[in-house]
Amino acid sequence: MLIGIDARMYGPNVGGGGLGRYVEQLILELQKIENNDRYVLFLKKNNFDDCKITKENFLKKTTNIHWYTLKEQLSLGKIIDDQKLDLIHFPHWNVPLNIKTPFVVTIHDLILLEEPYSSRTTTRNKLVHKIKYLAYKKVLKHAITKSKHIIAISQYTKDSILKHFPNIASEKITVIYQGVTKLNTLEEKTSEIKVPDNYLLYIGNAYPHKNLETLIKSFVDISKINPELHLVLAGKNDIFYERLNNFIKKQNTVMDKIKIIPNPTDAEIAGLYKKAEIYVFPSRIEGFGLPALEAMQFKVPVASSNTGALPEILQDAAIFFSPTNKEDITTKINELLNNTNLQNSLINKGNIRIKMFSWSKTAEQTNRIYKTCAN
């Protein structure tokens, strides 16, 4: 078989957080599977060299078209079709409407249907936002209805797809969990970013559904009991973190205790995890929850919201709170900060939980989907 993978989002620094990590690790692990299939990887210029090829049956092709653009819809389909592939895997919903090649799509979440506010980008123009949102719904519907198969990264995501698209057969959707990247094997590095000694940690983007403003409001109350504590937020530098930084400046009592670390490297992320007191995941909706599992590698107890896929993925290895209840967030984090037995219990359970997830298993299960669909 000749299989294509839309790898333009390869790597967390280009693709952004969990999605970029998913593409990166899937490709790395697929190269470890012995078979006669050939693969074409469509990459951008800025991650072409980052994608390391170790097998002769993998070919890289530069396709410097950005996602969520009109050019993606007008040109990418023909570029892919010209390769005469048996199948193409899109790791996200942004599938060209005019593509003729049979395709598999991975759906990570339906946050933009569940929380339309999170679809607002850098523009405040309501008309532009409305047009983009209508385009998103059209492209998403095409990806789900026209795909040969759908990979959902959690049962929660599968249930969301079936809720919003009830005519889709349940058998068309396979749940394949992500793995946990072994960041704890990296040489930790935080010396250049000057982190405080005692801090709560969040790693990820600052989209509205991530609920970071509520976390910051809660931190104001947490600081009254734990005045030496800091809050570290690390993620891709963009308009959302700029807005969040403006919000932080208005929190006079804790403004100097909150630090934003822009565009951290994997080594810096590893260092941040290792030194954190607690990893906090306040999102209102998540399709998986990879950073919480990464934190567990470093024996960091996790406090998480009780919504989306997070209870499914983390199970008894985290303490849960309501993301819309500031007082509940404050109470649960204070409880965890001051209960050594609870911390140790979560650390031990986290160590067991992360063994349930591996990228090799993700790749093997995904490869079986390829073979089934291509046949």
Image (spheres, rainbow, N blue to C red):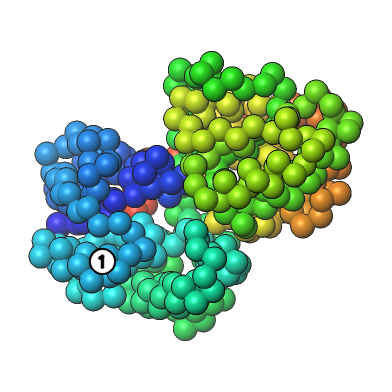
Q: Residues within 10 Å of mark 1 (few under 14, many from 20)?
A: few
Residue 131: percent from the left, percent from the top?
45, 77
| Identity of the residue furthest to the right in this view | 225
Q: Residue at x 72, y 22 (%)?
A: 198
- Left or right, residue 190 beside residue 69: right
Q: Report x, y in % for residue 151.
A: 41, 61
Residue 204 percent coordinates (x, y): 55, 43
Tell me: residue 198, above or below residue 247.
above
* Residue at x 19%, y 74% (from the top left corner): 100
Q: Quadrant of residue 358?
A: top left
Task: Using the image as rendered, state which of residue 328 and residue 217 is in the foreground.
Answer: 217
Residue for badge 1: 71
Q: Secondary structure at mark 1?
A: helix
Question: Given the image, on which type of amino acid does mark 1 rest?
Answer: Lys
Q: Quadrant of the C terminus?
A: bottom left
- Residue placed at 71% from the left, 41% from the top? 249
Q: Relative to 247, is 95 on the left or the right?
A: left
Q: Decide if residue 333 is in sight here.
A: no
* Count of numbered badges drawn on the protein: 1
Against 63, residue 134 (above or below) is below
Q: Residue at x 25, y 57 (%)?
A: 65
Q: Which of the 4 image quadrants contains residue 350?
A: top right
Viewer-side residue, 375 vs 140: 140
| Figure quadrant of residue 292 | top right
Does residue 181 appear in this view? yes
Counting from the top left corner in percent of width and height, residue 97 is at 29, 75
Q: Is residue 239 left or right of residue 150?
A: right
